Image (spheres, rainbow, N blue to C red):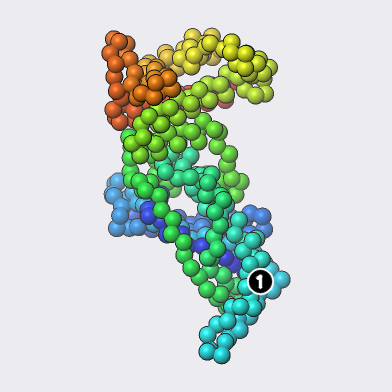
Amino acid sequence: MPILSAKKIIDLSPCFLVELPVNENSIEIEYTIDGYQMHILCEVDPDGGASISGALGLYPVNKITIIAQKEVDFTPDIPVSNSEGKDFANVQPFFQEKLNNYGPVVVEAFRRILSFYKFNLNQPNLDPVNFKNNKFYDMQWYDNNGHDYGSLTLSFSSPLVGQTNRLFEVEPYRVSDYELLKVTLIHGSTEELQHQILSDAQSAIMGKNLRRGVFEMAVACELAVKRTFFSKQSFSGDAFEFMEDKGKVKVTVLEFISSIAKAVFNESFKDNSSIDYQRIDYLFRCRNKIAHRGELVFKDDSGNVCEPSPEIVREWYKSARTLIRWLESQEQLK
């Protein structure tokens, strides 16, 4: 049986940051999913990199090629028109049907790549959730019998993503991430809502929308606290939802991660990370001002009204990430 291939070339502007040996210029991954043999090629811009050491470089990825291959009953011949050009009119129904099959597989592969870089490596301004609704109508089709049915490319850009920004704890792809990326491509991943919202907060802060970033960071922290202390699978979770609906829950996030955590886990975030705890305190003071007055301000411990600078908000962001990681580590010990 012939093997029909669909290839999608995605030009990036640039989108992802990777760390590779200086003599390598691509990442290649092969895997099988739903009967399709998949080939992923991520190509870096060798002229746009920055040297980390003599053996490693930090590069932006400027092109991704995704190929989906599968055995089919037949592949059509390409008729030649009277003008000696290729006439694709009669094969359009065939490729329309195949597009409906191959298209979602290729799109899902790219969505999972976006998701991996966004959530596993904390790279900003990627939106895998919305991208899953897009379709690639312009793929290159060819088979293993020498038929080439033509090709086009799609441009996809995401500003700021390729920048190395340690202020936001953005991590480049490293060779050690290969297996995890491959597992993500094969099995997909489901990110908890707090991680999605925290990633949105990161993008808002980078886009200088500090008020939205602060608000979303606080929401992400609240979600993480509720998940840790009141899981859906527990009776305490049902009790919490009942009391919350009745307006009888008055405990704050700060109380949960200090005194209550000490009682439940025998340790507290306040004791373990006092500086991060102070930043979370200020974060929620500012969130409350935003929620009640729409103002990006907070009162410090001396009673002074302060407007957080971008640098302060970035520190809050790192502390929010630290808190969520700490809560998840406690949850794993249950």
Q: Answer whether residue 146 is visible to the viewer in this image.
A: yes
- Residue 202 percent location from the top left of the image: 40, 35
- Residue 139 percent location from the top left of the image: 53, 65
- Residue 6, above or below 208: below
Which residue carries the number 1 mark?
93
Q: Answer whether residue 317 is visible to the viewer in this image.
A: no
Q: Quadrant of the C terminus?
A: top right
328 left or right of 295 in image: right
Question: Residue placed at 43% from the left, 22% from the top?
Answer: 291
286 left or right of 108 in image: left
Q: Please state which of residues 115 and 246 is positioned toward the viewer in this rendering.
A: 246
297 left or right of 2 in image: left
Question: Residue placed at 36% from the left, 35% from the top?
Answer: 209
Q: Residue furthest front?
A: 293
- Residue 40 percent location from the top left of the image: 51, 57
Residue 204's image quarter? Answer: top left
Q: Residue furthest right?
A: 73
Three-letter amino acid code of the residue under disc 1: Pro
Q: Please state which of residues 272 and 62 is positioned toward the viewer in this rendering.
A: 62
Q: Residues within 10 Å of mark 1 (few under 14, many from 20)?
A: few
Report the number of numbered marks.
1
Q: Please state which of residues 118 and 86 is positioned toward the viewer in this rendering.
A: 86
Q: Quadrant of the N terminus?
A: bottom right
- Residue 80 percent location from the top left of the image: 58, 86
Numbered disc 1: secondary structure: helix
Question: Residue placed at 29% from the left, 23% from the top?
Answer: 307
- Residue 317, above or below 47: above
